Amino acid sequence: MSSAEPPSRMTLERVIQLGMPVTELSVSTRMEEGLLIQVNRGLYLYADTGELFDGDAYMTFLRGYTKALEVSLPGVIARATGSTVALSNGLSLNVHTRPITTLGVCDSRGVPLLISASEGGSIRLWDVRTGEQRRVGLQQSPTTSLVTYFGPDGKPRIAAGGPEGSLYIWNPQLPVSPRIGRVATRGFNDRVAVQDLLDRSALVSALANVLEPGEGPTVITVEGAWGSGKSTVLEFVRAALATDADKTTRGSRLTVFAADRMLYRPPVRDFEKTLKRTVQSRKNADKPLVASFNPWRHQSSEQVWAGLAKTVIAAAESALTPDLNAKERYWFANNAHRVDRRHLQRQLWKRIYSPLLSFAGLGFGLSLLGALTKLNVTWSWWTTAGLAALGVLHTARRYFFSRASAFLPGELFAGPVTSNAFAAAGTDPLIRDPYYNARSGHLYLVQHDVKAVLDDLAGRGYQLVLLIDDLDRCVPSTTAQVFEAINVFLSDDFPATRFVLGLDSSVVASHVDHAYKELADAKVVAHPDDPSPGWTFLRKLVQLPVRLPRTTEDNVDQVLLAQLGPVHREEQPAELSEFTFTGRSMPDYLAEAEDEQIVIAIERQPLVRDHLRRRLMAQPEQSVREEKRLLNVWQFYLRVLASADVDQACHLVVVAEIAVRWPAYLHRLRGAWVNLADAVEDDVEWGATIARLGYGYGDRKAAANLRKLLQDCNARAVADLANRLF
């Protein structure tokens, strides 16, 4: 097995001509006078310079590898036959073209690499866990003996020699491997994504183009299973359609005088002009106005209609009422038609009446009493006249210059006034709308409010685009209410309005079937190609169904990169400082070098990330939501175990997958994990074990998928972990 990209070349630091065949190599373990290489048990060379050492080498030497065709690495045994290396983990390495002369092991700080040398003179380094060829060195003579050691920069070196009498010192250019730290991520929520992880920019752009004001599909559905990214697509569409509000001059404040005139003679809508504007709105609209409505939060018909009206009105305010003055004037003018104007007008006059006039009246009474009793209180008449004049001026100032909202209930200036089912407990009795009681109830009034707002939006050149999400989460009655509301909007009386629904079509069709199951002719009206009337209802309502594409392998990589960060590769070295080696042993040097290493979170370790990627791509239902669930469970139990072990983290991925894929079966598997692991390769034993755990005929698919998963991993290690955690 070979890597997809050519391996990096090793650097040849020096060649030492010895004049004799190299039959054995060793390296010293202490460094008082510099590291020594022993050749054929009689010749000593300084490893750093290649110069001859003339003293007595009273120190311990570690032997290298000479014609070794079998070596052991952690968890793997490598055996060379001809030009091929077979690994006990099932991989095969066969890049050499000439027979292999010796194998060896190069320790790259906790990540042992296999060395293979051939008669052709090539030396190659391999990652035995993945079969990836990491480095290659080409020399002019075959290698039969080699030894590895650490150079002054803390990186490994390879000394290689053979029958031609030359000693080659290679620098594999391997980085100092980082230490593996504990998991750093703390889980992920289910909020709308802020970046496009699933490459749906083209789909979003096409949807936004279709939704530009003018003729086009009125009802569009963005369809997909739960967790497929419907909400994210709708949010991206909303951002793509966003337009800047019109720049308008600040309106004048609504004074008491203006409010009094409106209450005396409210502005009358020109219904003929409104009708013409409604007809022309589809052609004249040039700006989209986007509003989002989530019916999941409204579980009764009254709440659905009230929430829908509130959503439309809130979105319209940015276009119709750019400032506080315009907002107060707009809503007061609309509400003036639907309150007891005469009663409200009388109350307005009472509230602007200056207190000084009351004092003037009291002064007039006292002055009159003084005159009757023949007291000399001439000054009181002047005082009373002064108070009366000030009172009149104060009242006039309030009437002509004060803000009307300071003297009338605030509900009149904030939106359509409400009554009956929608009136709050503290609603001012002055504005309890008799129009609610006189008409057919809340439905008529909400429709009236929304239509009036849409008419005004059409007059300003806006076309409403209403995004409705999570329809498949609602109860069937709420789903039916939303569809009824859409039908009202689609009537000819309403200005052109566009709808984009995020839903799981199979769930919503089932809701429609349930909501209208009383209809005797439901099956009669069903389309012949549809399995139920609910599907036919969607067929008739929706002009453009958009099915979200499935998640691909590339999407999995993008999600992992966004959620867990980049994978740490050897091209991201942790450079060590230069050291002076005099008077220190090799273990002391290695300990100090270890302190200089960087620490990477375990989720960025290449083997762990590859295992996560492989298991996520093997999921039967690809969705970002399910991927987040698996990652959440995996990182949580890594924290429970306080683990930074690579093998354990890989096994824990399988444990997390079992927990999120088959939560309904976990109670059956408790205490039986080892039995399952032992039986996974035997058909008869597996069937008997599954039967003892209570799996029936209806559970056969889940049992088969569980077995397939356990066969794809170290089942016993996974069972031991599951026994600890569940």
Image (cartoon, grey):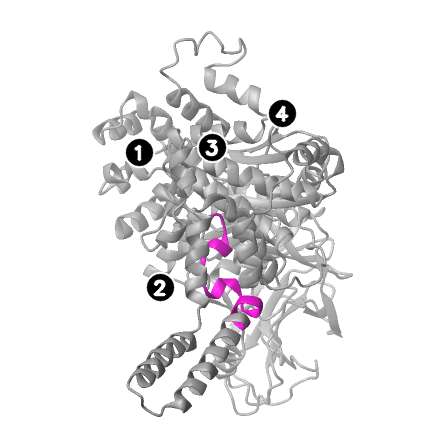
The residue that label 2 is drawn on is 642
The residue that label 4 is drawn on is 543
Residue 697 spot, x, y in % from top left: 30, 20
Q: Earlier in the sequence, mark 2 or mark 4?
A: 4
Give the Cα distance between marks 1 and 2: 30 Å
Q: Is 408 one of the magenta-colored residues?
A: yes
Q: Which stretch is magenta?
A: 397-416
For the point 54% across and 47% down, the residue is: 334
Q: Earlier in the sequence, mark 1 or mark 4?
A: 4
Q: Is residue 521 left or right of residue 93?
A: left
Quadrant of residue 9 in the image?
bottom right
For the point 50% across and 38% down, the residue is: 618
The residue that label 1 is drawn on is 679
**Contact, mark 1 vs mark 4 (Cβ under 8 Å):** no
Amino acid beneath label 2: Ala
Amino acid beneath label 4: Gln
Residue 95 spot, x, y in % from top left: 68, 47
Q: Earlier in the sequence, mark 3 or mark 2?
A: 3
Q: Is 285 one of the magenta-colored residues?
A: no
Q: Residues within 10 Å of mark 2 (few under 14, many from 20)?
A: few
Instruction: Out of 82 and 641, give the one closest to the viewer.
Output: 641
